[in-house]
Image (spheres, helix red, strand yellow):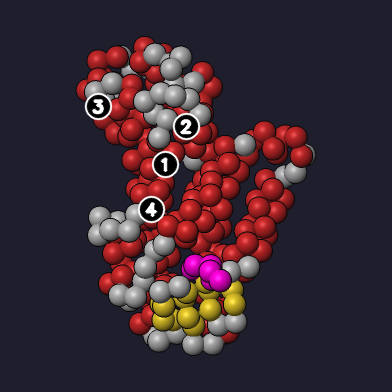
Amino acid sequence: MRTSGKDAKGRIINAAIELFSQKGYDATRVSDIADVANVNKALIYYYFKNKQDILDFMVRSLLNDAVSITMDYVNMNIVEMIKKGYLDIWPDRLHFVNEEAVGIFLQNTYKFHERVLDFAIENRDIIRILVLESLKSGKHQNSLFHFMDLMSFDDKNPIFRTITDADQDFSHSNEMALFEFFYTIIPIVSFAAYYDDYKSASSLSDEELRDSFLRVSKVITASLVSGSDILLKSRHH
């Protein structure tokens, strides 16, 4: 039976993920990927310019999926609550009409965190590759920082643009971006990268490990709540 182009490309990507994760990006040759994917090298070069292009494709796909998940959350939670008058964005906080509205927002946020976590676990091999490459002084050292594109303060970022279209008062501080990267994105990235190792060392089941992480995430998120507000910037005295 003839293999479709989509199937062949998928096998190439899956083979590259497996090899980059096990052997490392530098130690993997295109011929290795061809062997595991059961295709010839010429077909790989038909889809990708080189080995770097394969990794770049992985990063773009991962980021695009992350943007899609985040956009669902922004539209269904933040934008909808603004439209209904439950949420007003102030320069330093999210201000809700009452504490009940805060609770609804938090519940939707917890569901979002759950979806993001499952996405990260599902793609943990790719994330592990990005973490390994980020620790080297090579051409892919900054691949992990592509996740910062999710927090850029310009119209090229659909997440930022969608929120500012709903409320012009939204401003994303450098402090908030740092918090999101090091206290939200990096913990999930680290959890996914070390998921299998930690599971083995702790003897926890998949469900126990996942639920424990989500409980900690709830504590951190809830710490930002102050009455009917969720603070976006710290108060400087």
The amino acid type of the residue labelled 4 equals: Leu
Q: Are marks 3 and 2 in contact (CB under 8 Å)?
A: no
Quadrant that contains the N terminus: top left
Q: Is residue 65 above or below residue 175?
A: above
Please indicate whether residue 25 sits to the left or right of residue 207 in the image: left
Q: Are marks 2 and 1 in contact (CB under 8 Å)?
A: yes
The amino acid type of the residue labelled 2 equals: Ser
Dot 3 or dot 4, earlier in sequence = 3
Residue 130 at least partly seen: yes
| Residue 94 colored in magenta in the image | no
Residue at x-position 33% and y-position 62%:
160
Quadrant that contains the C terminus: bottom right
Say which of 169 and 104 sits in front: 169
Dot 1 or dot 4, earlier in sequence = 1
Nearer the camera: disc 3 or disc 2: 2
Question: Label 2, on which residue?
Answer: 134
Residue 153 location, quadrant: bottom left
Dot 2 or dot 1, earlier in sequence = 2
Q: CA distance from mark 3 to mark 4?
A: 27 Å
- Label 4: few (<14), some (14–19) or many (≥20) C-alpha neighbours in 10 Å: many
Question: Label 3, on which residue?
Answer: 47
Question: Label 1, on which residue?
Answer: 145
Question: Label 4, on which residue?
Answer: 150
Q: Which residues are magenta?
A: 232-237
| Image location (x, y in percent) of residue 73 | 43, 65
Residue at x-position 68% and y-position 60%:
215
The amino acid type of the residue labelled 3 equals: Tyr
For numbered disc 1, what is the local secondary structure?
Answer: helix
